[in-house]
Image (cartoon, rainbow, N blue to C red):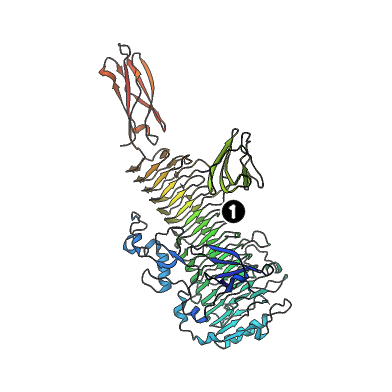
Amino acid sequence: MFSIGDVVRLRSGGTTMTVAQDDSVARSVRCIWMDQAGRCCEKDFPHAVLERAQAESMESRLNGTWVHDGSRHLDQTGLAGQGFDGVIDPPGEWADIPQQSEEAPSLGGAAGPMNAQALAIAKRLNALHGMGGAGLLDFAMSYAGAQARSIDAPLYDQELLVTDFGAVGNDEGHDDTPGFLAALEVAQIRGGARVVVPAGRTYWVNGGVIRVKGSRVYVVAEGAIVKMRPSPNENQGALITLGHYGDALVRGTLHDVGIIGGTFDGNGENQKQGTDLNQDGDNSGIRIEDVVRAHIVGCVVRNCDGYGISSVGTFLPHRSELVIERCGAIHNHYDGFDIKGGLQNYSLISCWSEGNGFGPIPNRGGMGFDLRGDDAVILGCVAGKTHPNGSGNFRIRENAGDNIVLIGCSSYNAPAGSYGYNVIGSNTGTYVMQACLSYRDECALKHSRGRLVVVGGSFLDSAIYTVFQSPSSQTVGTTAADVTPASGPISVAITDGRHIDCGPRNYVTISGGGSHIRMFVESIDTATGSLVGTVVQASGSNAIPAGSVPMIDNLGSLLLFGTRIARSRQDGIRITQSPYHSEFHGVLVQACARHGILNLGADMKVFGGEIINNGQAQLGRGVVFQDSDKDAQIIGATLGDTQSAPTQAQGIQFSGTVSGTGSVAQCRFVGVPPIQGVVPAAWEFSGNQGYRRTGFAVSNEFPVTAVGVQAISISHGLDTTPERETVSVSILREGGVVNYELDPPIVIATTSTTVSVSVNVRTAAPTPGTVARIAIRAGRI
């Protein structure tokens, strides 16, 4: 009744969905769709409750009126979880963003998002839609619409069925390739037409020969499967190609072409497998070579021994304006979507990429979306949700150009050694991520070069740290034993009848018999009374496995606005020593395994936000400056620990040799000591809550009735260890008695809690019981 790639909806109404799997025995299908929050959803439905959705007419697709279903609302504050319905709100909400940054002098104010730091969004979207400022953003046909209106619409009323030219379908022994070639040739001769691949059949074709070489030609394959014929001894090439760069008569002339609907199956297990790890796979699904205004919508590309959908070429004016909408790439041996350098002005909208990069040849790699080119919008795309991609999910390559923008994208389950978002980029490029999600990626974001602006979004639960081999069970009760770190999940049974007050997605500590574990609870098995999750501490063992990586690993110029970072398996953000400048505005960093932010030597500014409750698995701090000689500012942030049982040690730590200038102002320190380590001389603190930079204290009484040296320890009450040279001391003579002599007190040592002072009684007091005290003023005024 339904075929893979069909667009359907519930008979009762609702959003449209794409059929991903069909079970003819159970008479049910698995559908995939995007919800209003931009998440990729899937569910099985009986045939009886579904109907085919009304397909948009060819004219509506070309005149810019088609609106995709996975709409989202882009809130200018960039808050995580907001949808995007194509409207940017008035810019007033941006007016209160701090403007202290020399890097972003125009941020905020009436200009709103149209500023230097968010220029990629503004420049791209305004150019895309021909608007002078913020307004209604129709992401349907986008910029292709204006040119497409000039097309002679009746040309698209001409339908050429491949079955009228010899294609049969549903016969593996029949070569359907000639039928496709003949229909495409007639379409080219006529100056444009729809080449229709009738639904409900599987067509067997050879790779590397089916090409669209005529302008105004669309291949319409909704409800059909186009499958590559077996070729175990010879590489074939792509299933279908738009353009022909190798043909001088075609090169640079092709425009307004596309593919609508259909499943393109590369039959990868029955193809000759590429063996050169440094070369691309030869048997791709859909390939775009040399086209202006190509449009691919509603296609599923799977099982290709190569890329799913790829665009190739160099920087030439006739490689531009590509739109790929609602397409899926599933279980291809290389990247799901691969955009080579040279493509300009392109969009990927509501696409998904799953299970790519796991071909039969080990280590070939492959990821969800591999991006190059210039001026691109990647909107509402999803990678790795149900099946991880072998080499990560979204990558902006080292030879990428400028102005690549990701809006409302979601990355899941990037495996070890890979990244949810890997922004390598060029040294001069500007890249933007807005309202993007990373969930359970090994590393959510790595940024290497150029400037990256991140507005809103959430980076959550980087690949959960585990210390037990699965399947296994550790009983924690009166006879709990020590455990050995390994890998895998664990089910912990509570055997002594204690009530463990916790719920899913929470941390809990369980102890007994001299042993303890601390675990992150994934779920609760009520039938057996077990907690199922991952252990982060066990009898004092190091809870962070070797090779753990931070949630965000930054080597370039990184700007974050309103981003949430939580539950990293190591640090929340690591800034590697570099000459670049980074800024974090209103960022929330919480519940990371170790430090919230680790700065290893780069200029950094933090404005507002919260850095709290870190150190969940290993002694950690909010912000650590380690061996850094760069400048830093932390203004108006909250640092510390708000938990009833704190895990974060201090708000800020200075470790190793830290110099440079810095300021901490208008911050709020909560729950734990604010500072650890020696504060650099050129750092200034002002207007902070919960942090005492100077203090006055008095020692207990000590006797002065005998000559000799007295050692006195005085609690200074400060929130940091004062430097010895900042401590001043004086003698308080009790009762006004002056009949003894003391040498000037000497400061011997300072700790985080006390000042040790030595004082010599040179002439003893003759009156028994005579005492004195020492007063200290510690810290810089």
Left or right relative to 538: residue 101: left
Q: Which residue is mark 1?
A: 416
In this orientation, which residue lies closer to the viewer: 354 or 696? 354
| Residue 575 seen in the figure | no
Left or right relative to 371: residue 612: left
Picture layout, residue 109 above or below residue 632: below
Picture layout, residue 281 above or below residue 186: above
Q: Quadrant of residue 80?
A: bottom left
Residue drawn 71% across and 69% down?
270
In this orientation, which residue lies closer to the viewer: 230 or 684? 230
Amino acid type at mark 1: Ala
Q: Quadrant of residue 174?
A: bottom right
x and y percentages locating residue 337 in the rendered image: 57, 67
Q: Quadrant of residue 90?
A: bottom left
Callout 1: helix, strand or loop? loop
Residue drawn 60% across and 81% down?
196
Left or right relative to 652: residue 414: right
x and y percentages locating residue 574 in the rendered image: 48, 50
Left or right relative to 110: residue 126: right
x and y percentages locating residue 530 in the rendered image: 61, 45
Is disc 1 surrounded by few (<14), some (14 to 19) or many (20+) residues within 10 Å?
some
Residue drawn 29% across and 17% down?
741
